[in-house]
Image: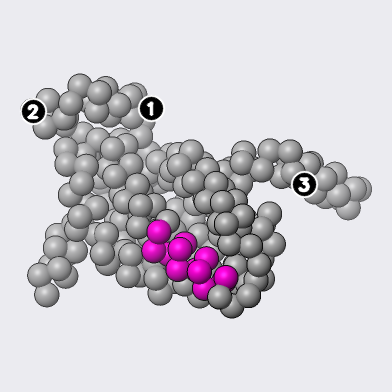
Amino acid sequence: MVDMSLTKAFRIVSSVMQRRPLLFNSMVYGFFYTSAEFIRQSFSKMSKPIQPIAAESEISPNVKGPILIQVQKLCETLDLVDKSADSTTYNWPQLKRYAIFGCLLAGPMLHGWYKWLDTFYSGKTTKIVLKKLFADQFILTPPLLILFFISMSLMEAKSDLLRECKIKFVHTFQTSCGYWLPVQFVNFLLIPPSFRVIYVSVAAFCWVNILCYLKNLPVSEHEQKVEY
């Protein structure tokens, strides 16, 4: 009975993956992204209580345009903005932000990127694999990280959308090179094109824990590192 249920579930997943690859890849990426943040918060709760959140939700008309103000008010309505919370509970607004970024932004971008990359650079020779590797790391990764920090700041309703990105981008990109270059080498060399986003999603399960750690570091700590 269990085997039949698993077989049926596998057929359904395979059917969705073939008929709706964009939807499937986006949902898978968002699931792993959000799960990694959930696990990170769980470990943080076990090691030490989550501190109450000091929200930065004030929106200054002198700094922001009317469209941006309305977008951030929408984020507040959707409960995406951090609020002072009980230290024993999960940070649900943050989990929502990671789900939105994974499903609606990063997932579709990666789906389209790998589809184009496999078409433009077909083959598995060492030269082709290296071209894909460096294109992925130095063409896709920088704007993806910028999008991550800016979109998170937007959903957090921060007064300065670029400040965190400016301070944390270089260190985050350096860390991503050390992690993603070997991971993507295996991806382009061994993984079939239709499973690229799934493979990256599993790898992202580990990477997001690193990214979340860097994201949650106080900005002042990054500023001190830059000074040194």
x%, y% of residue 149?
30, 49
Which mark, by number, is residue 78?
A: 1
What is the magenta range? 128-139
Q: In this rendered view, identify the residue nearer to me: 82 or 191.
A: 191
Which mark, by number, is residue 14?
A: 3
Give the foreground label among 3 and 1.
Answer: 3
Q: How crowded is mark 2: few (under 14 residues within 10 Å), some or many (20 or more)?
A: few
**Quarter-of-image position of residue 219:** bottom left
Q: Mark 2 points at which residue?
A: 62
Q: What separation in Å lies between label 3 and label 1 (alpha carbons)?
A: 33 Å
Q: What element carries label 2?
A: loop
Q: Residue at x 49, y 56 (%)?
A: 36
x%, y% of residue 34?
49, 48
Q: What separation in Å lies between label 1 and label 2 (alpha carbons)?
A: 24 Å
Q: Which of marks 1 and 2 is nearer the N terminus?
A: 2
Q: What element carries label 1?
A: loop
90 displayed left or right of 87: right
Chief secondary structure of the magenta span?
Answer: helix
x%, y% of residue 196?
62, 58
| Magenta region includes residue 22 | no
Residue that lies at the very extreme toward the bottom in this rendered image: 126
24 displayed left or right of 148: right
Residue type highlighted by circle 2: Asn
121 displayed left or right of 61: right
Q: Residues within 10 Å of mark 3 (few under 14, many from 20)?
A: some
Locate the C terminus by quadrant. bottom left
Q: Which residue is drawn at 48% across and 38% down?
A: 104
Q: Is mark 3 on a helix, strand or loop?
A: helix
